[in-house]
Amino acid sequence: QNSLAKEYGIAISSIARWVKQYSEVKFDDGTILTARQIQQLQKRNVQLEEENLILKKAIAIFTPHSTND
């Protein structure tokens, strides 16, 4: 990384960050994702979990409760 940094005039920290973001992870099913893609999927998962919780609360509010009269 030092030689790349010198050759292209880029900070070593930038190169390290790029390597971290774009290094690949291979899963058992053959899927290959970069660390950056995994991070994006994690963020999307959190967003979907929040939306799911909101929908569950809405269903609870708008679903009539049966009463035993």
Image (cartoon, helix red, strand yellow):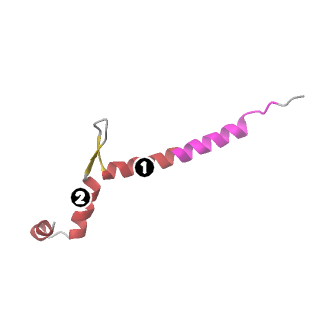
> Crowding at label 1, few (<14), some or many (≥20) Cα neighbours within 10 Å?
few
Q: Is residue 53 above or below residue 63?
A: below
| Residue 9 horizontal/vertical position (percent) | 14, 70
Dominant secondary structure of the residues highlighted in magenta in the image: helix
Query: Which residue is most to the top?
Result: 69
What segment carries the magenta color?
49-66
Residue type for callout 2: Val
Q: Name the residue under label 2.
A: 19
Q: Which residue corresponds to the image point at 70% horizontal and 39% vertical from the top-left?
A: 60
Q: Nearer the viewer, residue 57 or 25?
A: 25
Could you say whether the residue bearing mark 1 is in a helix, strand or loop?
A: helix
| Camera-side residue of 58 and 42 | 42
Q: Where is the C terminus found, in terms of image quarters? A: top right
Q: Where is residue 23 in the image (x, y as percent from the top left)?
A: 25, 53
Label 2 crowding class (10 Å Cα cut-off): few <14, some 14-19, many 20+? Answer: some
Residue 24 as seen in the image, left or right of residue 6: right
- Say whether disc 1 or disc 2 marks the residue closer to the N-terminus: 2
Q: Residue 37, image x and y in percent?
A: 33, 48
Residue at x 87% of width, y 29% of height: 68
Outermost residue, right side? 69
* Residue at the spot 18% in from the left edge and 69% down from the top edge: 10
What's the CA distance linking mark 1 and mark 2?
19 Å
Name the residue tied to disc 1. 42
Secondary structure beneath dot 2 equals helix
Report the amino acid beneath label 1. Gln
Q: In this view, does 18 lie to the left or right of 42?
A: left
Q: Which residue is drawn at 21% across and 69% down?
A: 12
The image quadrant where one finds the N terminus is bottom left
Percent position of residue 4, x then y: 12, 65
Asked if the stretch drawn in magenta spans residue 51, the answer is: yes
Query: Left of 63 or right of it: where is 8?
Result: left
